[in-house]
Image (cartoon, helix red, strand yellow):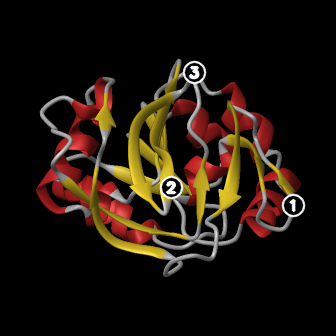
Amino acid sequence: MIAILKYNAGNIMSVKNAINRLGYESIITDNPDELRRAEKVIFPGVGEASSAMKYLTERGLDNLIISLKQPVLGICLGMQLMCRYSEEADTSCLGIFDTEVRLFPPVDKIPHMGWNNFFTLKGELFRGVSPEDDVYFVHSYYPEISAFTTATCDYILPFSAAMEKDNFYATQFHPEKSAGVGEIILKNFLNV
């Protein structure tokens, strides 16, 4: 069973539908026991960092996420919350990835919305994907490039499009909205 973490953030049904289309059963839950028992956990999200962290902290889900041993995939806000800190409302996050999330400088259209390709790719999520492939982004904040970066993209400046550490994987883009390429990336995660 694939558990999709419910934490007051948007876009959860799109992720559930994408997982179901790939032939996997999934549940949307914030129940700690269901999350611990799941084969894989997906931490999706569209929303605001401080209110999302408040929801997680009030329910003890912040410590639970950090303690999970099965593969965990953070998507968009989920990825940002896996970092140490976000400039969005001066938010302390989970600290899985020791890096910070910054607001794009106001020199171009924000948010970064639409299709973009990669500059570099490595890691398990990207088997069968090339740097020229496009994926779909919607974000105003970005994770800085760090030792955990497995894919980079450039919008105003280079940023982490994906990261990986131990059993934790994360994408700033939305694989569930990225057509065939996103399907490959989700399949790769579901097969780790």
Q: Which residue is mark 3?
A: 69
The label on residue 52 is none
Query: In percent of the image, x 54 and y 26: which residue is there?
Result: 148
Residue kind at label 3, given as amino acid type: Lys
Whether residue 140 is visible to the viewer of this picture, yes or no, is yes
Describe residue 125's horizontal placement relative to residue 27 as left or right.
left
- Give yes or no for contact between labels 1 and 3 (Cβ–Cβ under 8 Å): no
Position of residue 152 relative to residue 109, above or below, is above
Q: Residues within 10 Å of mark 1 (few under 14, many from 20)?
A: few
Q: Is 146 rendered above or below residue 87?
A: above
> Where residue 54 sits in the image (x, y, percent)?
84, 61
Q: Are discs 1 and 2 less than 8 Å apart at CB?
A: no
Q: Residue 176 at what x, y percent from top left?
A: 30, 60
Q: Quadrant of the C terminus?
A: top left
Secondary structure at numbered mark 1: loop
Mark 3 secondary-structure assignment: loop
Q: Quadrant of the N terminus?
A: top left
Q: CA distance from mark 1 to mark 3?
A: 29 Å
Q: Position of residue 169 (x, y in %)?
A: 47, 34
Q: Nearer the viewer, mark 1 or mark 3?
A: 1
The answer to which of 15 and 164 lies nearer the viewer is 164
| Residue beneath the point at 64% across and 54% down | 30
Residue situated in front as seen by the camera: 126 or 69 = 126
Is residue 129 found left or right of 103 in the rendered image?
Answer: left
Question: Dot 3 surroundings within 10 Å: few (below 14), some, or many (20 or more)?
Answer: some
Please tell me the numbered disc located at residue 90: 1
Neighbours of disc 2 within 10 Å: few (<14), some (14-19), many (20+): few
